[in-house]
Amino acid sequence: MKRLALCLGLLWPGLAAAQVLPALYDVAGVAGDDVLNVRVGPDADSAAMGSLSPNAKAVEVVALSPDGKWAQVNAGEGAGWVALRFLHKQDRPDWFALEYSLECSGTEPFWTLFVDPPTKSVHLNTPDAEGPELDIKASWPGTAAQPIAAVQYASEDASGIAVLRGQACADGMSDQSFGISLDLFQAASPDQPAQTLHGCCRLAPWAP
């Protein structure tokens, strides 16, 4: 199997170097008195729509250009492109390993979900109320071949399952791009009926 993987890597270098996204990167190789431009398109001739500081950390890359030279990132209320050669990937597990935090949101109505595997907890909030801390009861990490993961959570009055998929997602509120979609299946509780929510997730900054 290892020999086959090596042969494939020699025949198709892009396959061997495939990157799991989304992932967090740090800006590197930019002079201290300069900035890294975020451009409208994946090329140096595209107009700048924003910038990253030369020491920016935990920049979420959600996609790569077809040639693999440009990385799509969010800047303000939109998504743009930066030269990948100025980004260094953080040394952390892939998102579907469920070893660090995710921040998710949706608009049915507006809600936010914070999944924090390190503390085995989940927080589901709405504009009307900040939800209680829910304990993660079980989790199902994904793989590079199957970038799908799930988390089951519960408290005395609430329970549900969050299913996370590595795929392009739009939040319906901005022009930002996300690399993880969420289906949230919330069980019935004394205060509300069962409901299914759909949203997008971003990677929360994480320190090893």
Image: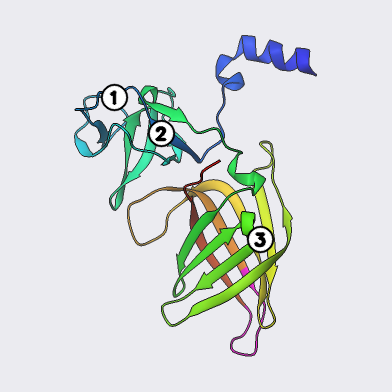
Position above or below: 107 against 143: below
Residue 57 numbered tag: none
Q: Residue furthest right?
A: 1
Residue 30 numbered tag: 1
Using the numbered discs, state the Cα–Cα distance from disc 1 to disc 2 in whole angstroms. 11 Å
Res 92 → quadrant:
top right
Give the class, few, some or many, for how many residues have Cα within 10 Å of label 2's Cα (few <14, many ≥20): some
Q: State the SS at label 3.
A: loop
Residue at 67% of width from left, 68% of height from top?
135
Q: Quickly name the residue at label 2.
A: 26
Q: State the SS at label 2.
A: strand
Viewer-closest of 99 and 2? 99
The reply to whether callout 2 and callout 3 are in contact (CB within 8 Å) is no
Mark 3 or 1 closer to N-term? 1
x and y percentages locating residue 128 in the rendered image? 43, 82
x and y percentages locating residue 115 in the rendered image? 57, 60
25 relative position to 167: left or right: left
Viewer-closest of 33 and 103? 33
The dominant secondary structure in magenta is loop
x and y percentages locating residue 183 in the rendered image? 59, 62
Q: Quickly name the residue at label 3.
A: 120
Using the numbered discs, state the Cα–Cα distance from disc 2 to disc 3 in whole angstroms. 27 Å
x and y percentages locating residue 172 in the rendered image? 38, 61
Give amino acid for label 1.
Val
Residue at 70% of width from left, 10% of height from top?
7
Magenta part of the chain: 185-194
